[in-house]
């Protein structure tokens, strides 16, 4: 796949696949394209060339008669439903309560009944340790609590794929642990495929089976965490790791 912003090509000839249930951590310097990859998969950015497949289905474009053809919006949305994303800055709906944040998409996108959506939402809030916050507005919560709501909101859609973009980077250090613990539990208890952008290297080691190192929109190395973190092949990876581990 390829992604350009104007004349600036930020992802070039990028080609990788992730197996169902696999947990992959994306690392690399600022501007290397990690967020862009997740946003392309979430269809928040438009792909400039090539294809993305989700569960074997083309996401936004398919090849027909040798041509690259855009798929109708309805079909794109059908596939996008299977993907959840959590952002660095939570992106909760500020004018809705926590419970409303969680039931909005299941009701309006999946057509779930309100009682069913609320029951599921309460179960998820319990899971992330926020059962007592369902009536609160997000602005009344700490950053760590807001991020756990955002994770619960993504899970309320029963995603097959979860995209996590530096979900602890905006948090005070003492709030990071709870959020990572919630993610560790999800990794242990579900078979959701995860693409994780993080600078939390211990967490990446513990939950992911694979680490991809990006630089300037290309994959520099791709391998199990013990390999990439302890004996990286590329000098660029070594430099990057010593900078973030300091
Ligand atoms: N909306 C945009 N318009 C123009 N250029 C963009 C846009 N979004 C990203 N870029 C450019 O694309 C490149 C990749 O950016 P991206 O945000 O994916 O990097 P990143 O690896 O997530 O970096 P960071 O670690 O700082 O979050 C950068 O050169 C960036 O300037
Ligand atoms: Mg980024």
Image (cartoon, helix red, strand yellow):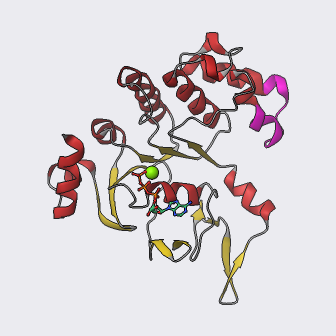
Give the vertical position of 8 relative to 27 (above or below): below
Q: Is residue 2 above or below residue 42?
A: below
Residue 218, image quadrant: bottom left
User: The C terminus lies in which quarter of the figure?
Assistant: top left
Q: Where's residue 158, x and y in %?
A: 65, 39
Does 217 sit left or right of 45 as displayed?
Answer: left
Res. 141 image quadrant: top right
Foreground residue among 168 and 18: 168
Magenta-colored span: 104-116
- For this view, does 189 lie left or right of residue 102? left
**Which residue: 24% across, 44% down?**
244
Say which residue appears at 68% left-offset and 22% top-offset: 98
User: Any magenta on residue 108?
Assistant: yes
Residue 55 placement (x, y as % from top left): 59, 59
- Please report the residue visible at 65 percent of the width from the left and 65 percent of the height from the top: 57
- Tell whether position 54 is magenta: no
- Secondary structure predominantly adopted by residues drawn in magenta: helix
Give the residue drawn at x 41%, y 31%: 184
Task: Give residue 43's position: percent from left, percent from top.
Answer: 64, 58
Q: How many marks?
A: 0
| Relative side of 195 to 107, left or right | left
């Amino acid at each position: 796949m390829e992604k350009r912003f104007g004349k600036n090509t930020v992802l070039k000839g990028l080609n990788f696949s992730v197996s169902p249930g696999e947990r992959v951590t994306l690392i690399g310097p600022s501007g290397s394209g990690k967020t862009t990859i997740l946003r392309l998969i979430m269809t928040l950015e438009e792909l400039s060339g090539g294809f993305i497949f989700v569960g074997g289905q083309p996401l936004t474009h398919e090849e027909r008669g040798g041509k690259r053809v855009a798929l109708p919006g309805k079909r794109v949305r059908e596939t996008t439903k299977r993907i959840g994303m959590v952002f660095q800055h939570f992106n909760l709906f500020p004018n809705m309560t926590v419970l409303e944040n969680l039931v909005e998409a299941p009701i309006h996108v999946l057509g779930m009944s309100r009682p069913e959506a609320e029951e599921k939402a309460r179960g998820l809030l319990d899971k992330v340790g926020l059962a007592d916050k369902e009536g609160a507005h997000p602005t009344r919560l700490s950053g760590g609590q807001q991020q756990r709501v955002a994770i619960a909101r993504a899970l309320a859609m029963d995603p097959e794929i979860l995209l996590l973009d530096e979900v602890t980077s905006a948090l005070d250090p003492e709030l990071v642990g709870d959020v990572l613990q919630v993610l560790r539990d999800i990794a242990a208890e579900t078979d959701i495929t995860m693409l994780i952008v993080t600078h939390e290297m211990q967490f990446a080691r513990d939950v992911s089976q694979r680490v991809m190192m990006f630089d300037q929109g290309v994959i520099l190395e791709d391998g199990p965490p013990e390999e990439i973190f302890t004996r990286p092949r590329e000098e660029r990876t070594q430099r990057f790791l010593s900078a973030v581990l300091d």
